[in-house]
Structure formats: C-alpha cells, structure tokens
Amino acid sequence: MKVLIAGATGAIGRPLVAALRVAGHEVIGMSSSERGVQSLREKGVEGVVANALDEAAVMTIVRKVKPDAVMEELTSLPKRYTPEEMRKAADRDRNLRLVGGRNVQNAARAAGAKRYIVQSTGFFYGPGGGLAGEEDGLAVNASPGIAGSVRTYMQIEERVLGAKDLQAVALRYGFFYGPRTYQDPKDGSVTEQVREQAYPVIGSGSGVFSFVHVADAATATVAALEADPGVYNIVDDDPSEMRVWLPAFAQFLGAPAPQHISEEEALRIAGEDAVYYATRLRGASNAKAKRKLGFAPRKLEWLSQAKAAPR
C-alpha cells in the first residue's frame, strides 16, 4: 500500500516510517522543512516538503503522490514541556491540526485515497468510574487549556470520521514515551525536570496517566490500515496515578524523589491545567485495540522496575 504521512519527522512519525517499511508498505513522508525531508531520504524513504497550512501546495503534492492511505500526524509542540511553553504553543498547534489537517484531508480525498488515519487523544477523557472506553465522552468541562484541547480533538474527529468517502480511523494515543519524546530517558524535557526535582507530585497525585511507547503506537497505526473504521485507544496496560508513576520514573532515572506541592501552590506557579493533570485525569482502556488491532504494548518500563525492586 502506498502511504503518505503528514508529519513524518515528529515523535510518532519517525518510528511510524520504520514500522511501515518493515510491513512492506511504500512510504512517502511529508515534512515542513528540507532538513526533515533529508532525514527521510537518508533512511531510504521518499520525502516531500510542504507546509500543511499552504492549501495549494498540499493539494498539488498529494495529488501527485496519489496515496492509497494518508496518516495525519501533525503537531507543533514546544521542545520544552512546561505549562508556560505549552500555553504559548497552544494556538499554533491548534491551527496546524485544524487548518493544516483539513488541507491534508481535502487533498487526500481529491487524490482518491481510501483510508485516512488521524492522531487524537487517549488521555483527556471526562470523569467516570474505571478506565474509559472509546464510547466515553471527553473532558469538555476540564480546566480551560485542557478543555480547549478537547474541543480541538473533537473537531478533528468530527471532520475525519464524518467523511463518508473515506475509511476513517481516529487513534487516541496515550502520552508518548521513548526516543524523542518528553519522557526520553536520555534528554527528554520531562526527564530533565525530574532530574532537577522541578516536576512535582501535585496534591493527591490521583490523576491517572495512560502512556504508550512511540514504537508500540507506530505498530498500532500500521495495523489500523487494515482495521475497521472508527476510534481506538492506543494506550499501554499500565494506567497509573501520578503519585505512583512519577516517583517510579525518578527511581528509574536514578534521580532524587520528586517533591510534593499542594494544589494551591501549583495553581499559583503552574496554573489550572497542571492541577487537572495531576489530580483529575482518567485512564483509558486498550481492550478494543487489543481485540481489533492485535495491539500488544510493552510494559511501562519504569513501573516494572519499581515493582521488581526489593523493599
């Protein structure tokens, strides 16, 4: 199958290119820079330069490629993961996902693509008991920044899943970890903050985080090329509360234990979104992805190590 990836040099794009090639697909990567395209060509993959916000350029390129399937993995996130940097990047990222994503989808339809896969969120589910399934609602009444992100993801899913002439799949990824992510054990932004004791447990730390290794997310995305259209949670088997995963991550890194701060202090220095993450996130279930995609994620490494350590 000929597959075009929009956002082929991002955190998920790089392992996705590799996974598609292993599966025998013809891959064309779209990047916004010549440098990104060069990195693709060095791996033996055809690359094309296009700013997703340039509607005419995207249309020209996608029509020329004539892909069987398109994967929309567009993001514009900051290198450093902090509440301030995320707020600064929010409008830019939202515009790329909404406007750029629409341009890519329109071009895919015009070029005759049959299958369309888009990135969505598996960690912004609304309140409820237990792990959230794909039928559960997202957190539309969360703190302002998170609620804004939720609205963006809902618009994306409505656009993609509402296209009657496409076999559409929305993959609700968990928090990425692994190479080139915020949790990269070498030099990820969250990793650096944990080492500096600058990433604290907030309040009760009862917010449940659902992670997924980028390589596992890529494998699931390749499987989605042959799966039934619809929505899938792409998260691992270890949803865990902040008060559990964060100290375990620090231990895994050989870093000092994280500090604990109150919700009031966090509101003052980091804002409402940070408190929501730490205290109100709801974990997601991967049962559907296991059943329909054959999804088999690895164990969350730092939790496994913490459980194995002598007490």
Image: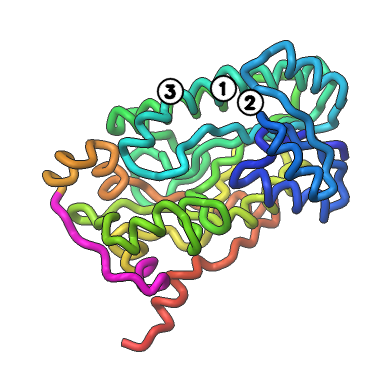
Q: Real-space Cα distance between discs 3 and 1? A: 20 Å
Q: Is residue 159 shown left or right of residue 190?
A: right
Q: Which residues are magenta?
A: 248-262
Crowd class of label 1 (few under 14; some 14 to 19; many from 20; radius 10 Å): few
Of 189 and 308, the residue lying toward us: 189
Q: Is residue 253 magenta?
A: yes
Q: Which residue is mark 3?
A: 91
Q: Which residue is mark 2?
A: 161
List x then y, in percent, for residue 252. 41, 72
Q: Closer to us: mark 2 or mark 3?
A: 3
Identify which residue is drawn at 46% across, 62% down: 238
Q: Amino acid at mark 3?
A: Asp
Identify which residue is drawn at 65% across, 35% down: 7
Q: Real-space Cα distance between discs 1 and 2? A: 5 Å
Identify which residue is drawn at 55% across, 41% down: 172
Q: Real-space Cα distance between discs 2 and 3? A: 23 Å
Crowd class of label 3 (few under 14; some 14 to 19; many from 20; radius 10 Å): some
List x then y, in percent, for residue 100. 61, 21
Mark 2 vs 3, N-terminal side = 3
Q: Is residue 140 magenta?
A: no
Mark 3 vs 1, N-terminal side = 3
Q: Is residue 305 shown left or right of residue 42?
A: left
Q: Which residue is mark 1?
A: 158
Examine the image and state in which quarter residue 125 appears: top left
Q: Is residue 206 above or below residue 57?
A: below
Kindly state the secondary structure of the residue where label 3 is placed: helix
Q: Is residue 53 above or below residue 233?
A: above
Circles 1, 2 touching at the beta carbon (< 8 Å): yes
